[in-house]
Image (cartoon, rainbow, N blue to C red):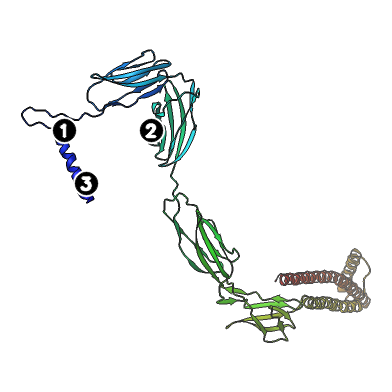
Amino acid sequence: MKILKKAIIVMMVICMSVTMFPVSDGYGTQTVQAASKVKLNKAKATLVPGQKLKLKISGTKTKAKWSSSKKSVATVDSKGQITAKKKGNCYIVAKIGKKQYKCKVTVVNLSAFTLNKKSLSLEENDGYQLKIKYKPSNVKISSKDVKWSSSDDDIAGVDEEGYVYGYTEGTATITAKIGNKKTKCKVTVKPAVIDVDSIDISDSTLEMTVGEEKQLYVTIHPDNATEQNIIWSSSNDKIVSVDKNGLVKAVSEGTADITATVDGIAAKCKVTVKPIYITDFTVDEKIEIRMGNKKSIIITLVPINATEIFKPCYESEDTTIAVVSQTGEITPVSVGETVIKVRFKDIEKKIIVSILKSKQQLLSEEDTRYKTEVSDINKTYDDQIAGYDEGIELAIETYGYYYGTYEEYRKELTTLTENIATLQKQLIANPNNTKLKKQLNALIDQKDTLQNEWKGKTEVEMYNELKEDSEEERTQKLEEAKTKHLKNIEDINALEEKNLKW
């Protein structure tokens, strides 16, 4: 029923329209069009001297005739543009035919004006209404009567009422101008804040071994959200830690949560840290220890960063040579060699352990060897001198000594030789002279005795020279033995120092 009533009303309106506004019938009859409402865009305006305002008339195509009731206050041109002159009131009239359309213009004196904001910060696609403060305060001017402009409309625009709109990131200056006076506002447009809806973490669970590192990543939704800073944290840094970039490091066995937070929205990853198991271990194949010292077995785990608890067992095959504690410390018992076994799970390693003489033993042996060598050198010298003594005693017993000087010996020997030669000549002349023969034989015996005595003296001199040479040789050999002995002691001390470092 309601639909039917609406249809009847529509038909009645159409019929009335056709009746009231006939159209041309093609024979010169003109229709009478309904007249549109003619009006000015402003009924009143407040201006300051020098300010311009454009009036517009609507509802007709007929050109209006413009006039001012008081040109000293405000004038108007043929196109409807008003120019304020001085303080006062007047009417601006637009005449169309016999009808007049008026706008009341009030011109006021304005000493100054300011905006409610000297600077303004907006987000993209955000806006703000600027307001004007006048001096004097009783001045009232519509914002529409103010000329607004922007230094960069691409960054920030302003409408005729002073509403500022931010378009894109940057800085622009908004200027409000009234007459010859103007004021400004600096507008900074920032990117619009886009809230984070949700975040995703690359792994919700992780299994790691002690010392291992893994990288976590976060995806932010939407990807153009303003806040992009990710805050990482661990529920237990002693088990697993995380740096500011999401790098996770396993510290010790256990479980902990890694949390990523963006703009108050969180995502978690549960991390389980397991120990690094021992697959093998190594020890020294041979160890040397001197009596009186101790040494601990050094074990290297495989892998070297293994975190599994390591409790090996130790055993010495010959405890009369060396014993080993369950902490791996070897104690020598006697000089010799034995094998130390090291066991962990089903892994066994063997170490050949050589127990060497102590420093004191080596020094005692060296001292004995040195004393023996010195004794042998001295005995050899004494035996050599004894042989020389026997030889010189024999020479003395055989020849005796000649106590004269060599010159006396040579003079006497020359005289005897000359006398023997003389007697020989005489004997040649008197071969049967018995007295000459006796004298000659006596001189010859005397000469032989003299020469033998001098030979005995020579043997003594040779003995003394040989004794001096032998003493020098003995001294040299004793010095060499001493030097060697001191070097051996130095080597023993060096071995001891090395052993202590071990």
Front label number (1 vs 2): 1
Q: Position of residue 243 (x, y in %)?
A: 55, 58
Q: Amino acid at mark 1?
A: Met
Q: Could you tell me which residue is drawn at 43 percent across and 31 percent down?
A: 174
Crowding around mark 3 (Cα neighbors within 10 Å: few <14, some 14 to 19, many 20+) is few
Mark 2: amino acid: Asp
Q: Which mark is residue 159?
A: 2
Foreground pick, 470 / 220: 220
Is 78 located above or below residue 146 in the figure? above
Q: Is residue 142 left or right of 467 when viewed as pictured?
A: left
Q: Secondary structure at mark 1?
A: helix
Q: Which residue is mark 3?
A: 6
Mark 1 = which residue? 20
Q: Nearer the viewer, residue 202 or 426?
A: 202
Q: Position of residue 155 (x, y in %)?
A: 40, 37
Residue 300 lies in quadrant: bottom right
